Image: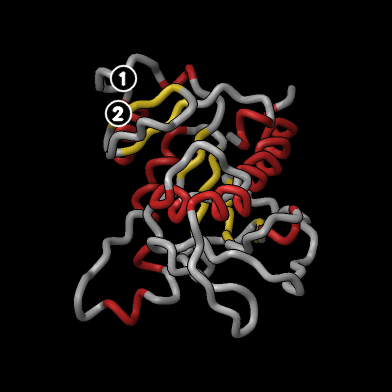
Amino acid sequence: MGYHRAGFDVVGVDIAPQPRYPFEFVQADALEFLETLTRELPGGWGKPIGAYDAIHASPPCQKFTAFASLWRERKTYTDLLTPTRALLEQTGLPWVIENVPGAPMRPDAVLCGSMFGLGVRRHRWFEFSQGEPMMTLACDHSRETVCVVGHGGGAGSGTKVKRWRAAEGAEAMGIGWMNRDELSQAIPPAYTELIGYQLMQHLAP
């Protein structure tokens, strides 16, 4: 939605069905989709690589979250960020990777919901193909926020802890079309709207 607001036509790709996704959607493994584009193989997805101006990738972040170490004895997550970057570099297109703080990537931009006046913090790193850092505002963690994670057992600021409902998460994130599980995996559209405006400038002739 953020890229749409910045002026892009958006095609989403995910391995799982996304019935509430508001734009054109392709159900496919993202790595296979990128490999098909890169090698110009027939993948049945209808568009050649030349149909795209840029690519945004959000590989699964579970391996790099602050809580991952607590679960390593019970579940091992795969690093999908590194192979995603390798395929993005092969496309020759401008690209953006988004992930959690601490992921093996260059934080060209670090965004927080407080920079946009949102009711959620959700810090995220963004790496750009052009390698140019983006200036952003400082975080303001003085206000209570909703921690939109898991299945509703979120936390506020300081020591205040509370459960959150889907309507609260939607308002805090600036998203009105997702259910609770989808909200817990999303980032606010305000983030990619800002990134999208920067990307538009980069693409301008």
Q: Nearer the viewer, residue 179 or 64?
A: 179
Q: Secondary structure at mark 1?
A: loop
Q: Residue 14 appears at what percent x and percent y?
A: 34, 37
Q: From this viewpoint, which residue is outermost toward the left? A: 74
Which disc, if any, is residue 45? Answer: 1
Three-letter amino acid code of the residue under disc 1: Trp
Measure how far apart labels 2 and 1 are at the Cα level. 9 Å
Three-letter amino acid code of the residue under disc 2: Thr
Q: Residue 74 appears at what percent x and percent y?
A: 19, 76
Which residue sits at x=44%, y=22%?
24
Q: Secondary structure at mark 2?
A: helix
2 and 1 marks in contact (CB < 8 Å): yes
Relative to residue 190, is residue 73 depicted above or below? below
Q: Which residue is mark 2?
A: 36
Relative to residue 32, is residue 129 depicted above or below? below
Which residue sits at x=46%, y=63%?
149
